[in-house]
Image (cartoon, grey):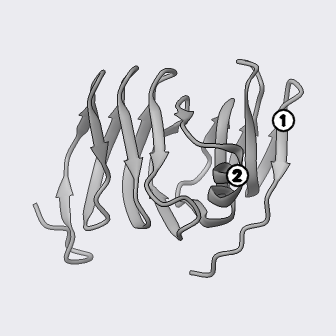
């Protein structure tokens, strides 16, 4: 199926299972990407379009080039429970260069695991939580409403890439 808004291919649904690795391809639009426990998702630099992204608690996410401009466009659900498999220096670099852009209205997006990047959700709510006591948020947030809960750990990292 070809996306009528560009020359990109469109894939309806992808699941990365335990012991599998998948590298996202910026030339493809994804309907749904689900990373199961034990699966690994690699995010390359570039612009990536995903309607729905879900990562399970023991899923692993890696950036192939931490610090390189990376833009993730989300037009639906975003469930982040993955582990970022990087050093603190890499997490700071990712926080400066990775941007998640939400085009949805009236949604709640929660982060209670380690995450790095800039969140742009002007019409939705963003919650940074520490329920799992297993993460730090490295980056910045622009949202309609921002809530910080349960002694969430936040390391403000200014976003420095220009689109």
Q: Is residue 142 above or below residue 163?
A: above
**Quick one: which residue is furthest to the left in this view?**
1
- Mark 1–mark 2 distance (CA, rounded to whole Å): 16 Å
Q: Position of residue 23 (x, y in %)?
A: 31, 49
Can residue 124 be seen in the rendering of this structure? no
Residue under label 1: 153
Quadrant of the rendering where the N terminus is positioned? bottom left
In this picture, residue 100 sits left or right of residue 72: right
Q: Is residue 93 above or below residue 154?
A: below
Q: Is disc 2 placed on a helix, strand or loop?
A: helix
Q: Residue at x 48, y 21 (%)?
A: 58
Can residue 84 be seen in the rendering of this structure? yes
**Quick one: which residue is furthest to the right in this view?**
151
Q: Quadrant of residue 123?
A: bottom right
In this picture, residue 82 sits left or right of residue 75: right
Quadrant of the rendering where the C terminus is positioned? bottom right
């Amino acid at each position: 199926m070809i996306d009528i808004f560009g020359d990109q291919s469109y894939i309806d649904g992808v699941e990365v299972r335990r012991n599998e690795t998948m590298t996202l391809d910026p030339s493809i639009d994804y309907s749904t990407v689900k990373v199961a426990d034990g699966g690994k998702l690699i995010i390359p630099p570039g612009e990536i379009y995903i309607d729905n992204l879900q990562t399970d608690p023991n899923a692993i996410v890696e950036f192939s080039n931490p610090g390189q401009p990376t833009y993730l466009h989300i037009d639906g659900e975003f469930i982040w429970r993955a582990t970022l498999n990087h050093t603190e220096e890499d997490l700071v670099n990712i926080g400066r260069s990775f941007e998640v852009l939400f085009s949805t209205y009236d949604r709640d997006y929660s982060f209670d695991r380690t995450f790095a990047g800039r969140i742009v959700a002007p019409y939705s709510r963003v919650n940074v939580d520490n329920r799992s006591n297993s993460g730090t948020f490295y980056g910045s947030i622009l949202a309609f409403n921002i809530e910080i809960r349960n002694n969430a750990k936040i390391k403000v990292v200014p976003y420095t890439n220009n689109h």
